[in-house]
Image: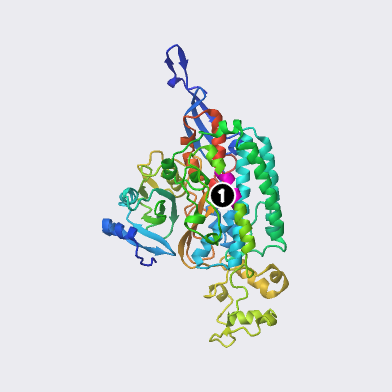
Amino acid sequence: MLEPVENSTLASLTARFGAAVIESGQDKGDLVAVVTRDSLHEIVAFLRDTSELDFNMLIDLCGVDYLPRKPRFEVVYQVHSLERNERLRLKVTVPEEDCRVATLSDLYPVADWLERECWDMFGVVFEGHPNLKRLLMYDSFVGHPLRKDYPINRRQPLIGPKN
Amino acid sequence: MSDTDSSQTTGQLRSESMLLNVGPSHPAMHGVIRIVTALEGEIVRSAEVEIGYLHRCFEKDVENVSWTMAFPYTDRLNYVSSMLNNVGWAMAAEKLFGVTVPERCQYVRVVVSEIARIVDHLTCIGASAMELGAMTAFLYFMKAREYLYDLIEWVSGGRIMATYIRIGGVKADLPEGFAGKAKKVLGQVREVIDEVDKLLTRNRIFFDRTKDIGVLSRERALSYGITGPLIRAVGVPYDIRRVKPYLVYDQLDFEVPVVEDGDNYARYLVRMEEMRQSISIILQALDRMPAGAVAVDPYGRELTGAQMVEEFKRARVADNVGSKARVDLTLDGTDRVTAAGVSRSTDRRMMLPPKEETYGNIEGLMGHFMLIMDYWGVRPPKGEAYHAVEGANGELGFYMVSNGEGRPWRAHCRGPCFFPMAALHEMITGGMVADIIPTFGSINMIAGELDR
């Protein structure tokens, strides 16, 4: 549950995007905004390009699998404004049957690798990504290992017996 | 392997671009990294970095162990500065719990973190210098690193894998006489740093091989989310110890070294200065360290009824005579109904009892098992938290999701060297083949952290 907080960034986000910001507030001192999947790219571009917000760094991106909850996945972004020293956590929920989010690699080049990792581990497709291939696993690896329904002891050896 | 499609004739000379795999079977590539380069003569025209398949499985593994059992896994993220990873994990978990550790513990954490930072920088600079042929600098720095590992061993029992920090405190207080010995060791380390400073900083060969090599502009560094010494080498004074202070860093005097150039030489200068700053931080922290507990609430003066009963059962009567108890409504003076209530009570004690008690009496042993057993132990409230500390290579953050169980539902590590690795191809494109390895060395890539 997010606590309500007075904050200019969240205020301008809700003023500009209205219902696309599902929930916003503070969680243990961190600013958090839950936004809709369709408006994510537009919101991040707004956060980056508006001079008084100036979120010029994408610090982190990761997926979370909430099986058996529906929608199942969540993609969590941490953007940071260097000049204003402010951090904002953006979250989007992603259903399993339509597992895709717009890429941010045109806004932040580092999203290229971060999204490849998230795709590799969770199978979330980043639409518009220029080179969406595995980063940590090898190309012929089957499945996405950080999904909750991927058993920790499953082996996929390239050489040797298969279980 | 030549790529004949892109061969072309320029004037009289026929030039041909060549694909060259740098690594993975090369000592400087740590065994897993491969850089696929397209060369034109000695110039790198394009490069693609592949981080290989180390399969550390950090994130999957910690989802399958308890919150406290994750510490040995965090040690192996950046295995050169394991204390910093320990602190990062513990502080993120404490944010989830809403717990603040005692002041002495915060000072102890600062001391061990900064020792780990010096160790990390010694390794990075030493190895980078060795890759340019400066074997002496490498050996000198390894010598200094051993002095510091001796200190870490004295504190934690392990030289490299410390597992010293706990959620809610540290394993044990610093050994007796630590401050004196640490000051002596830091004096020796400072001498070694000064020696290597004389060997390298104004050395013509070292200067020519690092100046204007591997340059990354400020804008590109920001857009790649790079933090740590690399971003301070492009003139950005971003240091989490300053911009979002944690522990007691806001009470200590230190400078954040900044160099503008953004090349390998600038990164070297930043790291050298940071080691000196870390030494100064440790000396200040040792002098100002207050007495007191190193973990949350072991012997608080005001006790709940349950704790009062525990204390008297352990025959710690003399310590507790005169302390007040907040009496509970139950007859036996305890608010717990069953044994399961211990870990589910609002009290939520998270620190393991001191080892003397675990081995010395049955209450301590039970307390230990209650916190260690699967699905029983430390249980943070439901929720999520992100906390970052300034690792040796930049922002080391942990994003944790708890569903109120004894294991993390999800724990994501923001490894600081992932981000410069994503930008490595830009740093080496347009440069010489011979500069690939020194530039790669300047990132201080640690494969355990890169892989998760």
Residue B165 visible to the viewer: no
**Residue B432 included in the magenta stretch of the image:** no
Residue B283: image location, x then y, percent:
63, 57
Q: Which colour scheme is used?
A: rainbow
Q: Is residue B346 above or below residue B182?
A: below
Type of amino acid under label 1: Ala
Q: In this view, does B297 lie above or below B167?
A: below
Q: Does residue A17 appear to the left or right of A125 in the view shown?
A: left
Residue B5 visible to the viewer: yes
| Chain identifier of the residue bearing label 1 in the image | B
Residue B189: image location, x then y, percent:
67, 48
Residue, far bottom: B331
Q: Which of B292 and A125 is in front in this view?
A: B292
Q: Does residue A44 appear to the left or right of B142 in the view shown?
A: left
Q: Give the range drawn in magenta.
A: B270-277
Residue B17: image location, x then y, percent:
47, 22
At x 47%, y 39%, the residue is: B423
Q: Nearer the viewer, residue B158 or A91?
A: B158
Q: Does residue A45 appear to the left or right of B124 in the view shown?
A: left
For the image, the number of numbered tags is: 1
Q: Is mark 1 on a helix, strand or loop?
A: loop
Q: Nearer the viewer, residue A63 or B438?
A: B438
Q: Nearer the viewer, residue B295 or B114?
A: B114
Q: In this view, does B87 lie above or below A102?
A: below
At x 51%, y 66%, the residue is: B405
From the image, give the main secondary structure of the stretch colored magenta: helix
Residue B224: image location, x then y, percent:
44, 44
Q: Mark 1 points at which residue?
A: B392
